[in-house]
Structure formats: structure tokens, C-alpha cells
Amino acid sequence: MINELLIIILAPLIAGGIAWALDIRGIREAIGIIGAALPLAMLAKLYSQVLDEAINYSITISGFTLQFQLNSMSWYFAAIASLVGLAMAFGMASTSKNGYDWLFALMSFTGVLGVFLSQDFVGFFLFWELMTFASFMMVLKRNRHESLKYFVLSVIGAYAMLIAIGMLYAKTGALDFASIRQALYIDAALGTITTRETAIIFALFLTAFGVKAGAFPLHVWAPGAYSETDQSYTAFFSGALSKAGAYGFLLLYILMGYKLYAALGTFHDHLVFAYIIAWIGALTVVIASFLAVLQEDIRKLFAYSSVGQVGYILLAFGLGTSLGFAGGLFHVLSHAVFKGLFWLVTAAIILQTGKTQFKDMGGLAEKMPFTFAMSLIAVLSLAGIPPMAGFASKWLIYEAAIQAHMPLVAGAIFLGSALAFAYVVRFLYAVWFGQRPSDLEDVKEAPLPLLIGMAILAIPNVLFGVAPGIVTDYINKMLGGEIVGGNYYKLVTPTGTYNALLVTVALVLGLAIAGLIYLYGAKVRKIPVTNTYQSGNPVTEEFNLSIRKNFYRPLAEALAFWLRYSFDRFYERVARMAEDFADWLREGFYNGNVQSYSWYLAIVLLILALWGVL
Amino acid sequence: MNVLAAVGEILVLIGTFFYFLSALGLIRMPDVYNRMQTSTKSATLGSLGVMVGVGLWALGSDFGSVAWFTKTIVIAVFLLLTNPISAHALIRAAYKSGIPLWEGSVVDKYAEHLMSKTEKSEIVEKEGDAE
Amino acid sequence: MLKRALAIITLLIIGYWLAQGLAGVPFGEDKMVVGKYYLEHVKEDTGAVNAVTAIVVNYRGFDTLGEVTVLFIASTGVGALLWRKKKKRTAKTEGSLVLTTGAELLFPFVVLFGTYIFIHGHLTPGGGFPGGATIATAFLLLYMAFVTYEIPHRAFEKTEGLAGIGYVLVGLIGLAIGGYFLYDWIWQTWGWGHDNIGRLFSGGFIPIIYTLIGIKVGTELSGIIDNMLKEGVSE
Amino acid sequence: MNAQYASLLIALPLISAFFVPLIKGLGNKAIKYYLAIVTAVQTGIAAWVFHQVYTTGDPIIVVAGGWKPPVGINLYFGHFAALFVLIVAVVSFLMAVFNFKAINVEPVDKYAMLFLLLMLGATGMIATGDLFNLFVFMEITSISAYALTAYNKTGEAAEASLKYIILGGIGSSFFLIGVALIYGATGTLNMAHLAQLAPYIDPKVVQVGLALIIFGLAVEAELFPLNAWAPDAYQAAPHPITVMFSAFVVKAGLYAMARILYLFASATGWENVTKLLVIMATLTVVVAEFSALRQKDVKRMVAYSSISQIGLIAVAFALGTQSGVDAGVFHMVNHAIVKALLFLTVGYVGITLGETKIEKFSGLGRRMPLTAFAITVGSLAAVGIPLFNIFWSKVRILLAGVEAGYTWSVALILGASVVEAVYYLRLIHTMWFTEAEGEAIKEDLAIGTIAIFLVLLVLFIGIYPNYFWTVSQKAGEDIFRVIDYVKNVPLMGVGA
Amino acid sequence: MIGINIYLILIAIATLLSMYRVFRGPTTVDRLVAVDIMTTITTGLMVLFALYYKRMIFLDVALVYAVLAFGGVIAFARYMEGGL
Amino acid sequence: MSVYYFGAIALVLIGLYAVLVKKNVLKILIGLSIMETGVNLLLVSIGYISGKSAPILSEGITASNAVDPIPQALVLTAIVIGVATTAMALSVAIILYEKYGTLNVEEIRRLRG
Amino acid sequence: MEEAGKISRYLYTVIVLFLIWLLLTASTDPQELGMGLILSLVIAAFTYPVFTTRGLANLHPKRIVYAIAYIPYFLWAMIMANLDVAYRVLHPKRPIRPGIVHCKTALKTNPGKLALANSITLTPGTITLDVDGENYFIHWIWVPDEVFRAESDEEHVEKASSNITAPFEKFLKVIFG
Ligand code: NA
Ligand code: NA
């Protein structure tokens, strides 16, 4: 009898391996989809069981005992990942034409599941690395530079984590979560681990999870990596894989929360370490959203958007309140489904048009109506417009921020939402409405598998938007308390109430009206794409604003001072310096002259002598 | 201690004195040719003295045997044979590697000989070319 | 100049350090532990009078096997590196009559002396290596004297290999007869030469091994000399 | 069978090497077959020894000449030696197969002898239980390595060999001074006997002596900054020899270093030596990784990478903890496999395409898919990706490092590992995702088979490391538990 | 045997003087000549040691040394001559 | 410290000095040989015991008045190893001279970096 | 000069080698004697072509007598040479007048020429620089007036030869022919 947890974790990898090895069109896709569907099926099967009692599995490998556990929280994360993973598989059936992609996409799927289910640091790290590596291979194929940037940052993060794990291991003698948690809990009182060491461990973990979550200023890999891969895969990459980072932050609370509190104390009634996380989240939201607004490439736009949205999750977790956790957890779900949906939509657009720049698009709503409908759902959800899942989660986070008396952070949420609105509106108009460039006349609707993938993600957007209580109910059980009140359609927090059903009804009506307006507008407003609000000024190439080109250029100019400072460029420069340093070292040390080499020996002898004599 | 030992000791003393002389020659003489003149001879004679001396000395002592004497004689003969050969090889090396004779030298018949030899061979070569 | 000064300072410090270490190993004092055992048991254990030889061939036979191997490697390596499709002696001028005649006259004597050295290895300070080196010197003299002289390479290479095989075989016979590799079966199992200690036919397998080593070393060193004195000829 | 027959591991390569001149006339092909057969037999014997040691759990002590140690020299086939001698034999066998394709430079008969003796030297270094005998085997190893480095007879090969000779010469001289000091202080050369006497040696003598011995071995073990010869030698040597260098020659030095280090663990001032070693080993990792970063020649790049991995093993050994040593041994095994794979395949590319410059690797995935695949697996393993073997040992070493309090070292090593990832991934990208110039090439079956065998080994250990980990642990205990080592060697009571 | 010290002193001086020539040169042949003298003197010294320690076996050593030294000097001389 | 120790260390250092300072490969190799000689001298000196004779148990020498035989045995081996190394080095130098036309170490550096 | 028969040459070599063996071992132990004989036979087998051309003829009694007589004669000459050298080395003014002179010899055999060359090298202020056929070129530390002021080459050779080679030749001619 093969263990169910093993099936959940390994099914995608095995399917990927087979798909890669066979690499026969059709069979490859079928096996991939089956492999991707299995975890979701198993999770669904185990749903009721998990809420009662955790399912455990352990295996000794290389002298390490790897422990896996399916409990309410890991189920939640795994289920989200599996959902997105399945959608990805459908998407890839349309967009990807080779076994390579299938192997690594599904491998990263396994990695993510392994991370969520691990109950010890060895397994956690192993799957973390596997997930990183597989996703990296997806990028490497298309763009070496971006992939290396992603990999270097990821590996720095992973290694930071490894040192932290090592330190915990050295201090507690354990590698499994339960023992570490207990040991740290006890140590919070004893204090054998110094504040300094605790802070170092915390900082290391922060780096590790921050990279994966794309938290500022470690986010620089995300835009390139998200864009430079198969866009169906990006759905998973951004929708599920980056959640591993967010999950890490949760883990930080679970394992070290008490110790961190004991060691680092509080600041203005907030836990210091949580406060740091919150601010990282807030900064990420604001900066990434600004940058998203300025993008001219759909992929880049959603890439920055993804970074910003994960910022919300961090921000929520950083609030340190149970409502914050609830909001964050909910946003994990909603971001997965709406951003996953976005990427599939993007995949469809790119697949059908071959274009990625706004300037080359327009008027696609007629040509790809179903895709358009899907993107509309995604837009609404992302922009936080009821009754989509995105609104529910953001609302909870907002409530939590207010409740936690962090107005600045709440401001960041607000600003982020405004900016998100700005960029999704642009997306909506530039791609779907307006005049269609002549070379897009023959564009067809996306192929079926891709559409199925979209549907898989669109449904939860709507479902959990209309009935957010399903999610909050589960989260309540997970966190063990009545954190968010209400029923399936109504959320109640200490400071507010949100009735999703009511909003839905209102919105359906509103949408109907909007649809009519659009249909009308599309018919009468045939104007050149470049003729915008410039009120008679001659249009030049340097300053050519339209919804499709340089639309937010004035904003960019306003922000020019800040845009000069780019962490991306900073890291690039560091990397170049490192390479130059490498050259210098190599040329200097291995200078080819054997006499110099003999001197090295003499100098070592000298050091030994001095060591001995002094 | 008997006569043999005494003779042996004297021979050893003479031998080592010639060693000393040989080395002194190395220092005192102006160029490599003249250094060899003084040093090889003395070193060989010195060795001869030391070898035979030790042989006799041992023969005359309580621990000694004929083997001592025969072996030292073998060494002595060997040196007597080889030292002049190495001296010869060295002086030839000195000359052929182009070390000039001391400025006070009065005659160099070897140079004349070599020159006439090369002339001869050149003539032969030319004749060969002509054919 | 600075480099020289630095070198001297560095070396002096290293020297001081080494001296400090050596201070713990005082000169001229009896520090023997295992050495004492050898001196006390060498005659009965191995039949050799020369304790050094007994150690080299018998007690620490592995070292010597290794040593033989090292020289074999050098000979092979030199042969490999200086290998050319076609080779000839580099020598341009013939040695003078003094040298040629001297070499001829000395050659048999030096060879005899070399064999004398390795055959008496268990009795005197000689052994396979100095004996072999002496024999090689005999060939060296011929090389020095005659511009065209060459050793018979193929025969030498084969002899070299056979001598090496012989050594290992002697060791393997020990393994077969006495149960240990390099076991002195002649002395310990067969008990030959026990009444001969101090005379030529004693010392167990030491004279055999030293003879093999002597032949091997002699041919090897000659081979090295041969290789060094040749250069490739372009065709 | 009499356990003393383990001495065949020494006798066989020797006698086989001596035999080569007699079959020289049969031609190069015959010599290559001969080499393959001999190494196969050696593998068989080594497998038998491995089996004996790991099933009985007791080491085989070969007593040369029947003289009990410390009077005679003994070989000690404990868990470590049994394992590593097997690795030496297996790798040699694989390289003997590789020779068919890789070695065309004359004189092949001499090459064959040197090849066998290189194998012999490493075997002896690993097996010997005597300090001076270690020196002898070390010289056998290094002198044959000098010759083989220069074997191609190009200027570069000679240059590399010269560097190796000069640095190796200095190293072995000082090693011998160390041996002299230790001998002077103890009157014995047997390792087990030395370990017994270690606590009673004059601290000054043992400090200087041990430092010198470690210094000498560190040159062979390629520790920074004593490793300047290594990249050149790796680059210039014939490809099979490069494989042997990284797979076991350097390891033999490393092992010897660890063995001697732990023998003297009870000596005063021992911690100072290990501390210094950790520093050197860490620097080895860092400098080597940086040196590989912009390397244009892939073989040289892999050479630097190999050096850095060696540094990692050295760190593990210098930690002074059981877990460190175990992890180090495990890494040794993994590294032997991975670097054999990489040098084999890169060398094969060199043979096929004429050189190993990075440009030659463009589009290799299309031209030589199997080779490119093998290189990819090797690279990913070297980087330490999960599901590849090195992941396990690397994590072990790093955990052991932090546990032993060398967090700074671990951090530096990890930093350097990032660099390693960069250059290996560049290589992978070059092979698979850049345009190919030139046709597809039919790949050699034998080499392909070896490569696949090694790839499977990499993946097998990556997925199921348990067996190899258990073996490595036992081997690690063999090094670390000096008390057991002393107990196992049947010392006769000389001077005690 | 008291006298042996006088011989040793004479030999020591001779060796030092030769050593001076070895280091001083000026030509390589000068050094070689000095080395040749030193080897001859060393042979004598070995024979004297044999006497001093009353060990005949050292005489063999002296002879081996003489043979090897001769070979070496001849080789170097031929090398200097340009004959190799 | 005895004159032998002193001489041995001096030889080692002189040899190393040559390696560190001399530019010519052959001189460097001579330096190496000098180092080896020093080491061998050191080994023998360590085995020496005042007033005792060579460990060849003939001509009235017994176990009680012989010096330690081990270092001498070791030195025999070490000398041969030294010879072998030198031979290897010389043939490498021959190739180097053929290929580079020089024996100056500063010009023999095609392999670097 | 014609060569002697192989057997004669071989036997001569064996005899010489065995004599040397006797000197080396100075032992009457039958083991040593037996081994010496075997080795002499073996080594002579491959060295005799190099070692001798005249074989047993070398053992002619007259030659042996002359050879024995030559020893004291030569030793005396050598001691004189060394006293001369001692004088020149120790004299503060260092009285030398070197040069290379040309001699001729009547000796025909190579061993004879070698013996002459070595004898010259070991005696008064002379070193054999080269031997080319019958011509000897000799470095002389004190070239006498009569030699370096000689008017013709012939005179030079004659004067030099009478000074340097002639004294030894009367013995060596008999011994080596
Ligand atoms: Na001489
Ligand atoms: Na003379």
C-alpha cells in the first residue's frame, strides 16, 4: 500500500518524468494532466479526514527522518497549489510543446507540495530546493540571464535558510518542526540562544522566505522569471510557488514566534519581528504596484502585480493578529486563483497573437470572447471589486490592519488597491477594447484545454467571492477560533461586515449595464489608437501617449527620481563586481609562475611557524 | 702499535697534507687550467697516501685484516686510474667551452692544431661540393 | 633584492621553528623503540648481519617494493616523456682516446663491483640500489665516451620487467608458502643458511631480492641515461 | 580464503605493470585490453575485500612479510580503505575503458604502466598503516602523476608537470621532516603505535611535526594556497588521468591527512591544527569557486570546481566531529562519482571536438545529446540540487559545520556555492539553449555506457542515499574512532 | 688514534677551500674542478672514517662513492665540453 | 642543537631559497635536490646515537653499540625517491626547453588563471 | 695490430675480474670464491669485447715485470711532480709560465696511450688536454724556454716530447706495445 501522502507529493513528479521520457504528443499531455490532477483528487478525498486528525508519514533517507503531515493548514496550502497546478496542466496542454517543460513544471509542483507537507527541515529544504531548481529550469530554457538572476537570489535564500536550519540544529539538536518548536518554546524562557543568534536566525529565514515570496528588496528576480517562461507555468509559478515563501513566514510564527517575541520584544505594542514583516509587505505592495503601472509588457505588468499581491499576504501576516492571519490566508487563496487566471489569460493572448506589448494589442474581446470573460473575472478579483474572492481577502486584510492600529500599513493597502485598479483598467482597455491592429484580424479563441484551465481558476474566484464564508469557515477551523464571523455569504469582523451576496446581486445588474455600454461604444468609437487626450498637440514618437503605449509615462516622470534607484541594477552591479573580483583573484593568484606558487608554500610554512612560535 | 701502523699513519698524514695543498692550489692559481695543474695531482697523491696509509695502519692494528689492505689498494688504484681521466675530461671541457688561457700563457699549439684541422675539413667539404 | 631579503627572513623564521621542534628530539641520544627490536632480533629473524638491509628488504619490505616501483616509474616516465618516433644520440663530439679507452678498461670492473655490492647487501652497507647505480655508471661511462653507443633497449626493458616480476613473485611465493606477502620463505620456512650467518649464503631471500633489484635498478638507470642523451629526429 | 590475500591489491598492479614490457610487441590495442583486464581483476579483488570487511565488520590487516606491527609494515583495510580501494579500482577500470578512445599518444605501453602504478599508489596510500610507507606510496602516486601530467608532451603538459613537481617536491620534503620529527620523538612509524604514544609526545615536537606532515599532505590534497599546481595539471593531463586525479588521487591525500590528523587527536595543541585547516579548506572552496566563475575552458572550470569540492571535504574532516567525518566520507564518494562523470564527458567532448573551450559546447545538446545530458546531470549534482547525490553529503557537511561552531565557514562556503551554481548553469544553458554549429555526432557506445552508469549512480544515490550513507558512516567511524583503529592493529609490545 | 683529529682538520680546511671555489667559480668548469677535488677528498675521508670506526665495510661505501663520483664528473665534463 | 641538525636545516633552507629566488628551472630543481639532501641528513642525524656504530652486526658490533638502523633504511629509500623525482623533472625540463625555448620560470606560464 | 682470439680475450677478462674479486673480498671463504668465479665468468662473457683486444698476451712475463718496475718509477715521478706543485702553490710569487705544447708518441695501442696520458697528467706540471692519433696536446704549467722559443714546429715537438712523453715511453712500450 503506497502512502497517500506520497501519492500527493510524488504523483506530479513521476508523471512529469514519464511525460518527459515518452515525449509523445498527446500522451505526454494526458499523463501530465493526470499527474497534476491526482494530488487534488487525493486531497479532496482526504478533506474530511484532515479536519479531524492529521495524517502522518515518515521515511528515513540518508540517515535523516523525513516527516510529512497533512493537517488542516498543509491541506489548505496543498489544495490551493493543486488547484492551480491542475489549471496549469490544462494550460500547458495548449501552450507547451515539449517534455522538458512538463518534467520541470510538474517537478516544481512536487516541490511545492513537498514544502507544504514537510514537518521537518530536511524535507522542507529538499523540496524547497527541488521547487526552486525546477522553476529555474523552466526559466533557463528561455532566458539565461533572467534565470540566473532568479537562481542566484533563490539559492542565496535557500542557503540562508540552510544556515538558519544548521543553527537551529546546533542549538536544539533537532530538525523536525515539532521538536524545534518545543525546544524554542522552552528556550524562550531559558534564553540559552542569545538575542543576537535569534536575530540572525530570524534574518536568515526572512531572507530565505522573502526571496521566494518576492518581497522587497529581494523581488528583482520575479518580473524577469515570471515573464521568461511558459505563461501557463507562470500561473503556477506566481500563483502557487511563490506562496511557499508566504508559507515560510507562517512557519516562522509557528516555530519561532514565541522565542522571537521573547528575544526581540515589542515596539509600540507590536511584535518587533512581526512589525518588520508587515513593513516589508507594505513596501512590497506599494513599490511593486507602482512598477506594475509603468510596464508596457503584459507579462511584466502581471509579474510586478504578483509581487505586489504577495506583499499583501506578508503584510497581513505581519499584523500579527488572528484576523491578519485569516486575511493573509484567504489572500493566499484568492491571489492564487486570480493571478493564476491572469497568467492563463496572458498565455492565451500570447499563444494566439504572439504579442506581449500593449502597443501591439487591442480589440481582442470580439475575437476571444471566452478569454475576455475570464480576464474580466480576474480583473475584478484583482482590483478588489466585489463580489470576487480578491475583494473578500483584501477586505479582511484591511479590517485587520485597522484593527491592529497600523494606519500607515492600511494606507499602503489602499494605495496598492488604487494602483492595481489603474493597471488592470489599462490591461482591460488596451487589450480587449479599442481598435484592433490589422495583423490581429485572424486571431482565434484560445484552444480548449487552456480554456478549461481558465475555468478551473475562474470558478473559485466567483465561488469564494460570492460565498467567502466557505473559506473563512475553514480558516477558523485551521486557526482554531471564531476569527471571522458570519455565514457563507457574510463576513463579520470586530470592525465591519461584508455581505457578498448583496454585492453580487448589485453587481450583476451593474455589469449588465456596462456590457451594453461597451457594445454600443465599440461600434461608434473608431478612432486611431494614437489619438488620445492630447488635445491637438502633435503626436511625436518621444511623447506618444495612448492607452497602449506609455500610458502612465507622466507617472514615470513624476517618479523619475525614485526610479533611478533600482535594486535590480544594484544587484546587477554587485554581480558584475563579483565577477570582476573573480577575474582579479584568479589572474592574481593563479598567475602561472611556479615561483610564485612556491612562495605560497613558503608563506604557509611561515604562517605555521609564526603560529607555532608566537 | 707496530711499524706498519706507524708507517700507515705517516702516509695518512702526508696524504691529508696533500689534500690541503690541492685545495690551496684551487684558491691560489689564477685560472682553471693552472688550478687543475696544482690540484688534481695533489689530490691523487693525497688519496694514494691516505688509502695505502689506512690499509697499512689497519693491517698493523688489532682489528685489521688483509682485506683492509686489499680493499684500500683497490680504491687507490681506481683513483689513480680515474682521477687523471677526469682531469683530462675537465681540462678538455674547459678548453672546448671557450675558457681562454691565462694571460701569462706563452704558447697554444692546440689552437693551431684545431685550426689546421678545420681548414682541412673545409677543403674536403669544398672538394665534395665541387664534385 | 627585496625578494631575496624577504626570502631570507621567511626562511630564517621557518628555520627557527624547525629548530624549536628539533630541540625536542635531542641529537645523539638513544631514541630507539622499534629500532632496538631490530638490532636485537635481526640475525635470528632474517639471517642478515646488516640490520639496515634486513629492515629494507625484510621488515619493511613494502617500502622497498615501493622504492623499486618509484624508480621504475621514473624510468618509465622518462621513457614516456622523451619518447620520439625516431631518436638518435645528441652527442656531437667523440670523447678523446683517454676517455674511450678508460671507459673500456673500467667497464668490466665497475660492473663486477656493482654485482659485488648487491650480492653482499646483507653483509655490508651495499644493496640493490647502490649496486644497480654502480652498474648504470658503467654504462654511463660508455655513453660518455662513445657518441654512438647505445644499450640494447628491448633486452633491457624486458630484463627490467622480468626483474620486477621476479621480486613480486618472490613476495607471492611467500604468500603461498608462509601465508604472508613478502614472507621470507627461504629463511623462515626452508631454514636455509641458518648456520651461515655472516657468510655469503645467508640472509634468506635478501640476496635474491637484492640481485633482482640490482639488475632492475641497473637497467632502469641505464635506460634513463639513454633516454636523456637522445633527441627526436624529424623524418 | 586467507585474508592476507588482500595484499594482492598491491601485488597485482605491480606485477602487471612490470609485465607490460614483455607484451609491448603485441601492439597498443592489446595493451589497452590488457589494462582493462587487469583493472577488472583488481576490481574483483577489491570487491572481495569490501565484501569481507563489510560483512564481518572487522578490518583486514595485511602483515607484510609476517612481521607484526610496529616491527613490520601493515596494511589496514578497514571500512574506509575497503570502500575507497574499491572506488579506486572501479574508476581505474572505467578509465581503462575510456583509454581506448582517449589515448592515442605514443608510447602507450609506458602509459599503461604509469596508469597501473598511479592506481597502485593511491591504493597503497589508502591502505597503509605506516607513516613512512605512506610517504613511499605518496611518492609512487605523485611521481606517476608527474609523468602522466606531462604525458601528452605538449608545452602546456610539461609546464603543468613542472609546477606539480616543484610544489610536490617541496611538500614531500617537509612531510619527511615531519616524519623525522615524529619518529625522533616516538621511535616508531606505525600509525596505530603512534596513536598510542601521541599523548606522551613532547608538545612542541608533535606540533611542528604534525603541522609539517599535514602541510605536505595538503599540497597533495589541493588545499589553498598549496593547490596552485592543480588546475594546470588537471587541464593538461590526458582525460582519463584527470578523472583519476579528481576521483581518487587527491582523495588519497585527503584521506591520509584526515587519518593522521585523527591519530594525533589526543596530542596537545591539536585543536590549533584543525582550526587552521578549517580556514585553509574554507578558503580553498571560496577561491576555487571564484576562479571557476569566468573560466573559458570547461575542463579547467570543472577542475576548479573539483578543487572546491575537495575543500569542502577538507572542511568536513577538519571539524573534529564524528558527523563531520562521516559527511566528509560521503562527500568523497559522491564527488568521486560526479567528477568522474564530468571529466569523462568533458574529456570526451575534448577528444571529439578537439578542445574543451566553452564555445565548443554551444548546442552540444543537439550534437551529442547523451554526452550533454551526462554533463548536465553531473553539473546539477555538483551544484547540489536535490535528487542528485551531492545534495545529501553537502547538506550533511554544512549541518555538521554549523554544529561544530564554524558558521562563518559554512556561510562562506554557501556563498561560494552560489557562484558554482552560476557557472554550471551557464554551461547547461550553453549546451542546450544556444545554437549549434556543426553536425550531430555519433557518440561512442562504451563511453556512453560508462556515462550512463555514472549518471544512474548519481541519481540512485540522490533518490536513495541510505545504503551509501550507511557505508560512508562506517568508513567515517573508521577514521574518527582512533581507539578502535589502535585496537584492531595487532601491535606487538615493542617498547611499550 | 689521537692523530685523526689533525687529519680531519686538514681535510676540513681542504673541503672549505674547495667549497669556496665551488661557490666562487667564476666559470662552471672551475666549480666542477672543485667538486672533483671534493669528491676525491671525500673518498679519503670515508676511508678514514672506516678506520676510525674500525669498520671495514665502509670501504665498500667509499669505493661506490668513488665510482659514482667519477661517473658524475665525467658526465658534467662532457656536458660542458658540448659533447652530449 | 648539533652541527648535523644545523647543517640539515641549513641545507633545507638553502634549497628552498634557491626555489624561491632562482629563475632558472634547473637551478630550482637543484634547490629541490639540496632540500632533499638536507632532509636525508636530518633523518640520519636523528637516528644517530653518540658513540655507537653503524648497525651492521659484524666486526664486533652488537645490538648494544649500534645506532638506530631505521632512519638509515628510510634514507636509502628517500634517496632513491629523490633520484627518481629528479630524473622525472629533468625530462620535463627537456620538453619544456624544446617547446618554450627557455628555462626561465617567468616565461613558462602559458597555463594560468 | 691484429686481435687475439675470442677465447683468449675472454679468459684474460675472467682472470682479471677474478683477481679484482679476490682483492675486493680478500676472503678465502669458498662461498665467496665460488660466487666470484661465477660472476667473473658471467660478466666477462659480455664485457670482454670491450675490455681487451690482446687477450692473454697481456700476461706475458716480460710485460708483467716491466709493469711492476714501472710502478716505483712512476710513483717517484709523481711525488716529484707534487713537490713541484707544492713549491708553486706555496711560493708567494706563484711562479708559473703556462702554455699548451704538442708532443708525439711512438706508442701504438690505446691502453698504452691511455697509460701515457694518465702518467703525464699525474706528473710534473702537465695535463693531457687531448690525444689525437700520435699527437698529444699538453697543458704545461712551466713551459721551458727551449720549447716555446723553438724555431719550427718540428723542433717544438721534439723538445716537448723529450721532456714529457719520452721518459715514460720506454716502459709503456714494453708493457702495452
Ligand atoms: Na675523482
Ligand atoms: Na694531474
Image (spheres, rainbow, N blue to C red):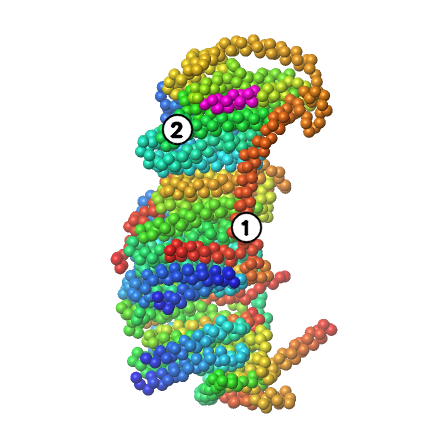
Splitting the image into 4 quarters, where does residue D138 fall?
bottom left
Q: Which residues are magenta?
A: A406-421
* Residue of label 2: A266
Q: Chain of mark 2?
A: A
Mark 1 element type: helix
Q: Residue at x 46, y 75 (%)?
A: E18
Q: Quadrant of the C terminus of chain A?
A: bottom left
Q: Is residue G58 magenta?
A: no
Q: Say what amino acid the circle numbered 1 marks.
A: Glu
In the rendered image, the vertical position of residue A456 relative to residue A222, given as above or below: above
Q: How many angstroms separate mark 1 from mark 2 (CA)?
A: 51 Å
Q: Residue at x 50, y 22 (%)?
A: A411
Q: Quadrant of the N terminus of chain A?
A: top left
* Residue of label 1: A587
Mark 2 element type: strand
Residues tagged by mark 1 and mark 2 found on one chain of the structure: yes
Query: Is A447 left or right of A413, judged from the image as shown?
Result: right
Splitting the image into 4 quarters, where does residue A186 fall?
top left
Question: Around disc 2, counting alpha carbons within 10 Å, would you say few (fewer than 14), some (14 to 19), or many (20 or more)?
Answer: some
The residue closer to the viewer here, D247 or C227, is D247
